[in-house]
Amino acid sequence: MSDFKFTAPVIQELLDSELSERSPILSLQDKILAIRNSLRPGQQQMADWQSGPLAISAVPGAGKSTGMAAAAAIAIARQYERSSSRRHLVVVTFTRSAAANIKAKIRKDLKKLSLPQTGFFVYTLHGLALNIANRHSDLSGLQLENVTLITPTQSHRFIRNAVEQWIVNNPERYLRLLEGHQFDGEETERLRRQSVLRTEVLPELANTVIHEAKSSGISPELLREWSKQTTDEYAILSVAAGLYEQYQNLMRSRDFIDYDDMILAALRVLENDSARRIEQNQVFAVFEDEAQDSSPLQTQLLEILASDVGDEAGGRGQGAGGRGQGAGGRERIITPQSSIISHQSTLNLVRVGDPNQAINSTFTPADPIYFRQFCEECDRIERLATMDQAGRSTRIIIEAANFALKWINNQWLATTNNKQQTPDNRQVPFRLQTIRPVEVGDPQANANPAPVGRGLELYTPRDIHHTVELLSQRVIELFGEDPTQNSAAILVRENRQGRWLGEALASVCKEHKIILYDVGERDRRSHVPQEILALLQFCDRPHSPDYLKAALEALVQRQLIPTQDLNALASLPEEFLYPGPLAEPQPETVQKAARLCRSLLRARLELPLYQLISFLALTLNYDQAELATADKLAERVNQQIAGNSSMGGMLSALSEIVSSERFEPVETEDSEERYTRRGQLTIITMHKAKGLDWDYVFLPFLHENLIPGRFWVPPQSQFLGDFTLSEVARAQIRATLHEESIIPDVSQAWEVAKNLKTSEEYRLLYVAMTRAKLLLWMSAAQKAPFTWSKPDNLQEQAPCPVFPALKRQFPEYVVNLAAMARQA
């Protein structure tokens, strides 16, 4: 690349100087050159950076963190050479474990350069924002000793309270939602719809819109203005604006903040000229990893920090370009139009990511369009580098991943465009970027290793039980006599699959001394306080439809009662719990749920208060680790209510623990090490597997109803129409952020939401496939559950559309099960 002319001058300088061995500067240059030469071409382009904006689009397994660490160390070394100032490099990544990993790598490279292991800071995006806000608390408005950080979910009490307050303030709009379509006024149906709206539809709408809007600097007032451009019968964006406004009022009244408030607080600081100059004076550049997962406000924060002091383009709070309502009342909407053209010479920002690994945009405000846009703008000014060589996987796995990417894009074009026009970069699931094996002589040890067996194995078992048999057999063969030499993982689409697999494989792994680690089982322990609270609230107020439904949901989740229409049960608590002699006979599934609920109420009357949590833990059939978590919870609650022991006090203490999320297990080891240990078979979701790799990766249950999945309206909320309010609102907000000419109507927005979901599911499969080093094992059983809440209810299931295409493209890798059976 013409912009990165570092290597040639250094080599010439080394050749021309007779004092190279004695000169400390040249000695440092020699060490820099040694690190650079240990990198691949794509990584070298990052190491050659000296100033200005740079986008790095990297394929899976290309060594992003290794390249970034080396580039960071070299950038710090150059800063030492050319400046006596103490400005430092800011490195930003997505998770705390990734931050710890890249920090260790930078220190290692600085040690190779014989430099102090200083001159840089590594943050998560929210950690960086909190650091800035805390240094200027008078400007940020955050007094950390007085505020509590929360991560609201759909069931959070602030969301629920916002919904209730909105209903009180907007009775006419609520009545319109309640009527929906074809409402005959029947009382039981009215109660059912009330339950659905208050506990599902409106909380989901509030949760979705609050995340989308706050992450882009959109105020409730601006959202209300946008709603005037829409004509849907429910005024969805106006309803969402009201819920958002109530939520903000509740947060302020209790001195609570969420993660988006951190970013907004940091931006309030940077709107002040003096504070902005102070912060920019401390930074000579910003390096960002996993850039495809950034939200608009996060991108803006980084661009302002990365702008040189005195650069007005970067200092006006418009780093990502846009308009709208900012925290201080000024306009701020973030759009994907990058500002790098206007101040490219002074924006010292390196962003590294892979838009094809963007798998969080349907449940976070992240959107791959923003990083794609940054790549396109950098490409236009010749500031785009591509890390397309990957040494992680064997060649057949790379070929399979490349084929899947191209096939999905082609199918997308055939379906949506009839191949008559080229779509823009937001319409296809993938950026066309081919993974290439590394070249001969690559510095990475064992790059593109030889495959184990065929390297790719495609199975079509009879059913999910046959899947477990085949998978068990292959695991035993692969781990062999010395299991400690191998790492393997089963990647599942949802935790319920993982739980079922864990139970099915437990005896096999124990017999063959293979450690089985179910990541979802460990994660479920963090839900212990919430489940206990749900049951205690029901015990305290069994006549409450909300509390009854929450308790029933916990019992269904634990598979203690069958899945059924909980809204119908919760709408009339007395009839459900204690049906009269004239009531219609309850089905067996309802009877089972009622019996369990009545046993909880008896325990509330018969047991002392301090024993209730332990009793509920046993009732929920917790495992040993979950019981230990429940015991810890009980001890904590009993300490808090000592001297005021009452059900009300217990519920208040539990509610505070759940809502403030202070009850977190202490991590004793790095999560990556825990998930990828040798001698271990890890069961983990595809989402959590991102950034990890194993020798052998198993992808069972590849069915169309999960990937790309069904985009459907839950039966209980179909009275509102053939769409969900939350997804329509999300699509409408993003259309405005993406500067589309008009806000789509309900039907158009629903189609956009479908396409976003489908694209992300295919990217998730791509991420899963590229986790494997030596063997990728894939299967789609002929019979599988329609829903994994009922794993024994098997029926014919269509495979994920990519799977038959892979079988056609790679017929020699299709495993002949009939031949296997004959050999057995």
Image (cartoon, rainbow, N blue to C red):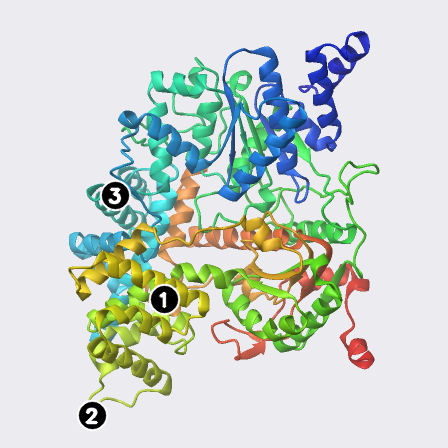
Crowding around mark 2 (Cα neighbors within 10 Å: few <14, some 14 to 19, many 20+) is: few
Q: Which amino acid does label 1 sit on?
A: Gln
Q: What residue type is labelled 2?
A: Pro
The percent coordinates of residue 666 (x first, y second) are 44, 51
Instruction: First in sequence, mark 1 or 2: give its number.
Output: 2
Q: Is mark 1 on a helix, strand or loop?
A: helix
Q: Is mark 3 on a helix, strand or loop?
A: helix
Indicate the quadrant where residue 125 lies: top left
Q: Who's the residue at 32% across and 58% down the image?
A: 155
Crowding around mark 3 (Cα neighbors within 10 Å: few <14, some 14 to 19, many 20+) is: some
Q: Which part of the image, by quadrant, shows the N terminus? A: top right
Is residue 671 left or right of 394 when viewed as pictured?
left
Q: Is residue 622 above or below residue 113?
A: below
Q: Who's the residue at 69% across and 17% down the image?
A: 28
Which residue is nearer to you in this view: 228 or 197? 197
**Residue 581 numbered tag:** 2
Q: Which of marks 1 and 2 is in front?
A: 2
Q: Which part of the image, by quadrant, shows the C terminus? A: bottom right
- C-alpha separation, residue under disc 2 versus residue under disc 3: 48 Å
The residue pinned by badge 3 equals 248
Q: Who's the residue at 68% across and 20% down the image?
A: 4
The residue pinned by badge 1 equals 718
The percent coordinates of residue 724 (x first, y second) are 38, 58
- C-alpha separation, residue under disc 1 versus residue under disc 2: 33 Å
Indicate the quadrant where residue 438 lies: top right
Do tag 2 and tag 3 residues touch (Cβ < 8 Å)?
Answer: no
Which residue is nearer to you in this view: 26 or 783? 26
Residue 64 seen anywhere in this rendered image of the structure = yes
The percent coordinates of residue 509 (x first, y second) are 64, 70
